[in-house]
Image (cartoon, rainbow, N blue to C red):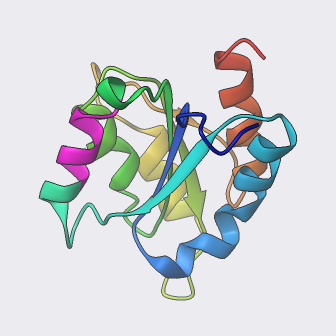
């Protein structure tokens, strides 16, 4: 993968502290030679920035979005509300969660009709990347 390749996969996290748990997705995409980017944008703290990123994703050449989120895990659903690209949600454990990631899992898996979001297992960013690879046909 050359540095000049435009990213095909956009990875969103709501907080810089989520980067470490999303690193397996970055590593997996790198191992497949798939250009990607990671952005920190919160569905709760910076909702306009999330909407702007997702609305412009296709125009920038992105083909899949991966969104990692804990607790209420709104980020994947908000992303899906602002793009027609496939969105893969990664529920993340949080030290603030009383349900050890189950809250995030249910929030992502139980999207309302018309807001499709794929959901992988709790803290399983690698599987999100592997799903993105399959969506891209690689």
In this view of the protein, can residue 98 be seen by the observer? no
Image position, residue 112 (x, y; %): 29, 30
Image position, residue 103 (x, y; %): 48, 63
In which quadrant will I find the N terminus?
top right
Residue positioned 25% across, 53% down in the render: 50
Whether residue 57 is situated above or below residue 100 in the rendered picture: above
Task: Place residue 130 in its image quadrant.
Answer: top right
Is residue 27 toward the left or the right of residue 104 in the image? right
Residue most extreme to the right: 31
> Looking at the image, how many numbered discs can be counted on the residues?
0
Question: Magenta part mainly helix, strand or loop?
Answer: helix
Image position, residue 59 (x, y; %): 30, 25
Residue positioned 22% across, 67% down in the render: 44
Residue most extreme to the top: 137
Foreground residue among 65 and 5: 5
Whether residue 89 is situated above or below residue 138 in the rendered picture: below
Residue most extreme to the bottom: 95
Foreground residue among 128 and 16: 16
In which quadrant will I find the C terminus?
top right
Is residue 109 toward the left or the right of residue 14 in the image? right
Whether residue 71 is situated above or below residue 32 in the rendered picture: below
Residue positioned 45% across, 46% down in the render: 108
> Magenta segment, which residues?
50-57
Is residue 21 toward the left or the right of residue 101 in the image? right
Is residue 131 toward the left or the right of residue 51 in the image? right
Residue positioned 58% across, 51% down in the render: 90
In magenta segment, residue 118: no
């Amino acid at each position: 993968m050359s540095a000049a390749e435009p990213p095909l996969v956009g990875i969103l996290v709501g907080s810089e502290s989520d980067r470490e748990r999303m690193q397996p997705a970055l590593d997996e995409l790198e191992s497949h030679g798939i250009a990607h980017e990671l952005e920190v944008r919160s569905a709760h703290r910076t909702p306009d920035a999330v909407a702007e990123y997702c609305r412009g994703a296709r125009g920038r050449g992105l083909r899949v979005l991966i969104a990692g989120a804990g607790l209420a895990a709104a980020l994947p659903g908000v992303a899906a509300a602002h793009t027609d690209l496939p969105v893969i949600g990664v529920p993340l454990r949080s030290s603030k969660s009383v349900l050890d990631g189950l809250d995030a899992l249910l929030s992502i898996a139980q999207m309302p009709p018309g807001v499709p979001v794929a959901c992988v297992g709790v803290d399983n960013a690698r599987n999100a990347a592997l799903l993105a690879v399959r969506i891209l046909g690689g």
